[in-house]
């Protein structure tokens, strides 16, 4: 009996992990109603119902199986509710993200592109400058946004891609509350911009070294770096 209980509990771990992630995701999204619903349904309603039904049909083995089955039932109901929801503009599988209406920006209000070569970086900087100008961003900040992307993405392509492996830099530009937000993400070796700058010693004989990075830091309103799942994420506010 104990062996059967352990086997069924082990089988329940994968769907349990998924349901826990879903609950945490909804909580982080601010959707407390759905987060509470999936947690209460998972730990109480679905579990009690499965114990009652399976226990009656299969005895003690049905009780052990109920926890695994209840996890799968909760996940299935969540996916079904996501597919049938109407309080969203999302289509297809995007409904399962449970993002509120109006969460996503119109395609005309942001730039999102991946680059793998320096030629693409140069062309993209011109595109960013034109994009900012077309959205009434002043000439100075339009130029700075294009300059920052060209410098940082160019450095990544030049130095980060030098290991001979296949890499890309994902770049996104959006406008929010009057600011221009630049996000650069790459899968190269870890590179904390601010930490590296603090460790550099200015060489009087070569003052031009790292001038691009120092210029980006001095002209930006804010620069934030994180490394998540071996991905460098750089957020620059202009």
Image: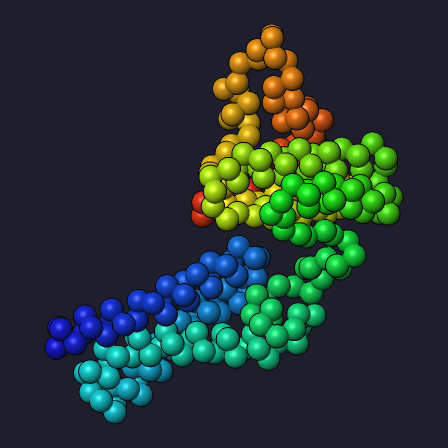
Q: Residue 67's spot in the image, x, y percent?
A: 30, 75
What residue lies at 66% left-to-right and 33% top-to-bottom?
151
Colour setup of the view: rainbow
Query: In which quadrant of the rendered image does the N terminus lie?
Result: bottom left
Q: In the visual, does 63 lie left or right of 135?
A: left
Q: Residue 17's spot in the image, x, y percent?
A: 37, 63
Nearer the observer, 99 or 180: 180
What residue lies at 61% left-to-right and 22% top-to-bottom?
210
Count of number-bearing discs? 0
The vertical placement of 35 against 62, above or below, is: above
Nearer the observer, 205 or 147: 205
The vertical placement of 202 against 231, above or below, is: above
Tell me, yes or no, if residue 2 can be seen here.
yes
What residue lies at 40% left-to-right and 79% top-to-bottom?
73
Query: In which quadrant of the rendered image does the C terminus lie?
Result: top right
Q: Which residue occupies the extreme bottom position in the image? A: 57
Q: Which residue occupies the extreme top position in the image? A: 204
Tell me, yes or no, if residue 231 can be seen here.
no
Q: In the visual, does 6 lie left or right of 173?
A: left
Q: Residue 182's spot in the image, x, y percent?
A: 67, 42
The vertical placement of 24 against 49, above or below, is: above
What residue lies at 37% left-to-right and 70% top-to-bottom?
15
**Dividing the picture into quarters, in which one does residue 122 lie?**
top right
Q: Residue 5's spot in the image, x, y percent?
A: 18, 74
């Amino acid at each position: 009996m104990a062996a059967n209980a352990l086997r069924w509990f082990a089988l329940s771990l994968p769907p349990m992990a998924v349901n826990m992630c879903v609950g945490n995701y909804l909580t982080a999204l601010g959707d407390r109603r759905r987060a509470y619903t999936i947690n209460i349904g998972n730990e109480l309603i679905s579990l009690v119902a499965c114990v009652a039904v399976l226990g009656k049909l299969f005895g003690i083995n049905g009780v052990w199986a109920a926890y695994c089955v209840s996890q799968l039932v909760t996940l299935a109901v969540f996916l079904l509710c996501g597919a049938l929801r109407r309080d969203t503009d999302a289509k297809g599988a995007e409904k399962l993200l449970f993002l509120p209406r109006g969460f996503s920006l119109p395609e005309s209000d942001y730039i999102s592109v991946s680059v793998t070569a320096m030629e693409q970086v140069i062309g993209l900087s011109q595109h960013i400058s034109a994009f900012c100008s077309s959205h009434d961003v002043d000439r100075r900040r339009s130029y700075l946004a294009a300059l920052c992307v060209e410098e940082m993405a160019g450095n990544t392509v030049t130095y980060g891609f030098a290991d001979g492996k296949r890499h890309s830099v994902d770049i996104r530009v959006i406008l929010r509350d009057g600011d221009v937000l630049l996000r650069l993400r790459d899968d190269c070796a870890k590179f904390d911009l601010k930490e590296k700058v603090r460790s550099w010693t200015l060489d009087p004989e070569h003052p031009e070294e790292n001038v691009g990075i120092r210029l980006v830091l001095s002209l930006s309103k804010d620069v934030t770096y994180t490394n998540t799942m071996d991905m460098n994420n750089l957020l620059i506010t202009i």
